[in-house]
């Protein structure tokens, strides 16, 4: 069974950091580009970052560039999203998606498999 599981969310103060993990089971993550998306209440799901099958290719949304870093550990079948200098506007449920075609797009339509999400709340 193909499954993605996100973890690492929580409550953090503005300026703090979190590291999210996206772990795959039932398939080999290195065969997919992986994207991180987020969805706040009442808003559409938006792309945050993605990483291609080759670790050299990464894409970031303008709103997180310089604060977030995406990486992958194929040996652990896991992709990470390191989030630093968090802002209240980063509060959302964060999802990871897997894209077999390696489109490297921050568009949810490009991703075939999704996890259930992990919630991030940035608040004082």
Image (cartoon, rainbow, N blue to C red):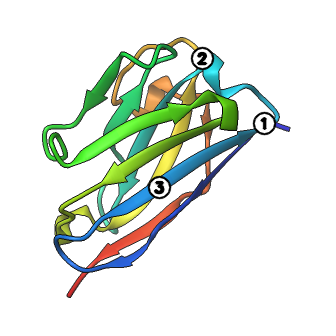
**Residues at marks 3 and 1, CA–CA distance in whole angstroms:** 20 Å
6 with respect to 81 (left or right): right
- Label 1 sits on a secondary structure element that is loop
Q: Position of residue 12 (x, y in %)?
A: 32, 77
**Label 2 packing within 10 angstroms: few (<14), some (14-19), many (20+):** some
Q: How many numbered circles does the render carry?
A: 3
* Disc 1 target residue: 2
Q: Residue 94, located in which quarter of the rendered image? A: bottom left
Q: Secondary structure at mark 3?
A: strand
Residue drawn at 51 percent across, 33 percent down: 72
Check disc 1: other Cα within 10 Å, few if <14, some if 14-19, many if 20+. Answer: few
Where does residue 41 sit, x and y in percent of width and height?
A: 34, 69
Measure the alpha-carbon separation of dots 2 and 3: 21 Å
* The N terminus - image quarter: top right
Residue 44 visible in image: no
In terms of sequence position, does the residue under pointer 3 or pointer 1 come before the other? 1
- Which label sits in the foreground, 3 or 1? 3
Percent position of residue 116, x then y:
61, 56
Judged left or right of residue 7, residue 109 is: left
Residue 114 makes an appearance in the image: yes
């Amino acid at each position: 069974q193909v499954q993605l599981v996100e973890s690492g969310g929580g409550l953090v103060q503005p300026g703090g950091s979190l590291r999210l993990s996206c772990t795959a089971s039932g398939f080999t993550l290195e065969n997919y580009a992986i994207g991180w998306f987020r969805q706040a209440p009442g808003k559409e799901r938006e792309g945050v970052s993605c990483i291609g099958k080759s670790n050299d290719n990464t894409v970031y949304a303008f709103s997180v560039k310089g604060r977030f870093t995406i990486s992958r550990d194929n040996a652990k079948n896991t992709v990470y999203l390191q989030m630093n200098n968090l802002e209240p506007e980063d509060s959302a449920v964060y999802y990871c998606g897997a894209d077999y075609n390696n489109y490297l797009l921050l568009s949810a339509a490009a991703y075939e498999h999704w996890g259930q999400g992990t919630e991030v709340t940035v608040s004082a």
